[in-house]
Amino acid sequence: MKVQEIKNAISTFESLMEHLPKIKELHNPTSKVYPLISLVAKNEAMRLFSDDSTELKPFQPFGNLAFPYFKMGAIDSVNLFALDELIMFSFYWINRSRYSRVLDIGANIGLHSIIMNFCGFQVRAFEPDPFHFEQLKKNLELNHCQNVTSIKAAVSTENTNAEFVRVLGNTTSSHIKGDKNPYGELETFQVELLNFNELIKDADLVKMDVEGHEKNIILSTEKSDWSTVDAILEVGSDNNALHIFNHLQKIGVNAFAQKKGWQKVCSLDDMPASHRDGSLFISLKTTMPWE
């Protein structure tokens, strides 16, 4: 890659991180500018992170990032720089003095944990799939992440063990058995589960991407569980959206949806029901903090 191309990519990411918090109303995936910004982000990620180099490359404002190319079936590591992820990175950065103890539940190969580390957070990264976990550890080491503790386990509603399903054609869709209806070639193995409600006692922010298990986790909470912690998560289905919406309404906890420009969720129609709708922010706060 030419030096000027690298400089352009670095400048683009830095500009995105600066301006994304200022245009939160346009984070809605159906907004007119979303596809354009998404394309720009994809092209710049390809420029910087589409090879297997372990070289540290400037990824401002966070610092220098090493993230070698890694294939996960239909998805690869470049996809982890999609616009929805960059929106979350900008949220971490703008809130780096608000949060300090973070749970990365469904850490995959560690990009969110690395960015959180760059923000100064103390991070516990949970990833049950050994295939991803080994790459997670390598990426944490490459980026000298002293603030991240990696834990090979899934998070659920109790401390136990469960059968885990790995989707060989897309390992990012691997999940606790029963949470999804997968297709293609599968393999199963046992994983350790840890109790969410115990873990959040020592956390103030949760990032959750658990491939359908979010319903079980959120429905296990009471209002008091949210007194000192916020969460940002993906909702994987209409059914999960329905149950999470009803539960949060019942216990008096607020939700804010990316598909609404991070405005408060007031009806089921406001809820995300797949990754295409963007993320959901859960909190006792009256607004999502973007300043």
Image: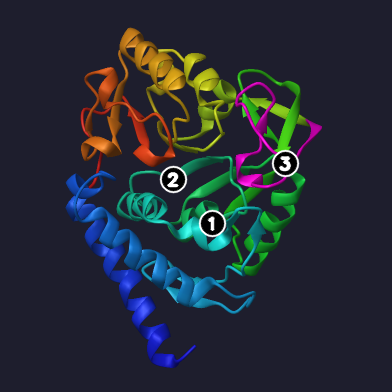
Instruction: Specify the amino acid type for callout 3.
Output: Lys
Residue range corresponding to the magenta coloring: 167-190
Residue position marked by numbered label 3 in the rendering = 152
Task: Of the two numbered discs 1 and 2 on the same chain, state the one appearing first in sequence.
Answer: 2
Q: Are marks 3 and 2 in contact (CB under 8 Å)?
A: no
Q: Looking at this view, name the residue that lies furthest to the top.
A: 250
* Left-right relation of 239 to 167: left
Q: Position of residue 88 (x, y in %)?
A: 38, 49
Residue 184 is one of the magenta-drawn residues? yes
The residue that disc 1 covers is 111
Q: Position of residue 168 (x, y in %)?
A: 72, 45
- Occupied quadrant, residue 99: top left
Question: Viewed as shown, does residue 260 lie left or right of 81?
Answer: left
Q: Tell me where residue 283 sits by quadrant.
A: top left
Residue designated by label 2: 100
Q: Is residue 93 visible?
A: yes
Front residue of this view, candidates 52 and 193:
52
Circle 3 SS class:
loop
